[in-house]
């Protein structure tokens, strides 16, 4: 099993700095892997009592039935994970408000490569580290997958995001979160975060919402954030090369447009 070696955060302790309102219904934060999962999770954690945060695991299909308690209406919890669309997951989340976080597939390819080549990730792709393959080859593997070792971009986005569309989920783009974090003093930022957090059904919008959001989004609190990755020696470009952009369009035609990227 692959392992993620990340420094623990201190957000449970910081949560006590804010007055918390008990959650009245379960809420699930779903996401495509490497799309800002920790960022949105940490923001939400500042608006929910720690006792109602499901810290046992990132919920995924292979262990779903072991963690159905996260979705029990009798004991509402905020939970998170990478939950594929399937019959079992649809039934489990039938009455649970759900957010699905995505990212521009162009940037996702870079983020996935950066993560796999760092020491933060330890698993079946260890043999690719240390310059064993070129950066362009690594990017192509992120797009087309690796036989019996890693799924394709199309497979990941299809089952983690696209298949959930039209079922009542709230689609959130990672870039929109980052955009408004960089302009927190603008009215648009408050409107965005009010809408984002509306799934919590807070009886009143906290006056200290901005402090909560900034606390949760602190980069130092995310061990998988780009700048906090351990042992990354490869130089991954900031923008996907033109050929790889074309390969994304070949591998998943229409995906970017469907998710709102133009």
Image (spheres, grey):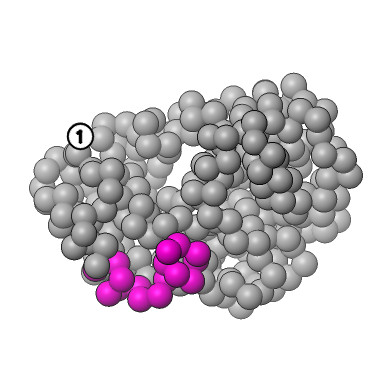
Total label count? 1
Q: Does residue 94 appear to the left or right of 252 in the view shown?
A: right
- The location of residue 39, given as percent across then percent down, is 54, 41
Q: Nearer the viewer, residue 88 or 174?
A: 174
Q: Secondary structure at mark 1?
A: loop
Tell me which segment is drawn in magenta: 247-262
Q: Nearer the viewer, residue 144 or 7?
A: 144
Q: Nearer the viewer, residue 190 or 16?
A: 190
Q: Residue at x 77, y 67 (%)?
A: 95
Q: Within 10 angstroms of label 1, few (less than 14), some, or many (20 or more) residues?
A: few
When the figure is inspected, residue 250 is found, relative to residue 262, above or below; the finding is below
- The location of residue 24, given as percent across then percent down, is 85, 50
Q: Does residue 246 appear to the left or right of 46 in the view shown?
A: left
When the figure is inspected, residue 110 is found, relative to residue 150, above or below; the finding is above
Q: Residue at x 43, y 50 (%)?
A: 34
Inspect this view and state whether residue 113 appears: no
The quarter holding residue 249 reads: bottom left
Does the stretch in magenta take in 240? Answer: no
Q: Does residue 16 appear to the left or right of 38 in the view shown?
A: right
Q: Residue at x 32, y 31 (%)?
A: 230
- The location of residue 60, given as percent across then percent down, is 54, 59
State the residue position of label 1.
233
Q: Residue at x 45, y 70 (%)?
A: 257
Quadrant into which the C terminus falls: bottom left
Inspect this view and state whether residue 223 appears: yes
When the figure is inspected, residue 41 is found, relative to residue 208, above or below; the finding is below
């Amino acid at each position: 099993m692959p392992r993620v070696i990340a420094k623990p955060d201190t957000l449970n302790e910081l949560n006590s700095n804010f007055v918390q309102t008990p959650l009245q219904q379960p809420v699930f934060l779903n996401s495509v892997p490497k799309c800002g999962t920790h960022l949105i999770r940490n923001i939400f954690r500042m608006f929910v009592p720690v006792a109602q945060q499901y810290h046992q695991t990132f919920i995924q299909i292979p262990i779903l039935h072991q963690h159905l308690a996260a979705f029990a209406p009798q004991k509402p919890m905020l939970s998170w994970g990478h939950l594929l669309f399937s019959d079992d997951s649809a039934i489990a989340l039938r009455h649970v408000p759900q957010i699905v976080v995505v990212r521009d597939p162009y940037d996702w390819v870079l983020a996935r490569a950066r993560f796999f080549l760092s020491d933060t990730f330890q698993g079946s792709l260890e043999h690719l580290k240390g310059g064993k393959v070129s950066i362009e080859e690594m990017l192509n593997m992120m797009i087309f997958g690796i036989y019996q070792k890693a799924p394709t971009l199309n497979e990941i986005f299809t089952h983690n995001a696209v298949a959930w569309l039209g079922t009542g989920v709230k689609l959130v783009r990672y870039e929109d979160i980052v955009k408004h974090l960089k302009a927190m003093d603008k009215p648009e930022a408050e409107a965005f975060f009010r809408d984002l957090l509306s799934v919590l059904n807070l009886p009143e919008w906290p006056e200290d919402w901005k402090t909560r959001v900034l606390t949760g989004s602190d980069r130092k609190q995310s061990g998988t954030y780009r700048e906090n990755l351990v042992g990354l020696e490869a130089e991954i470009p900031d923008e996907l090369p033109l050929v790889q952009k074309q390969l994304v369009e070949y591998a998943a035609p229409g995906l970017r447009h469907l998710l709102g990227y133009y």
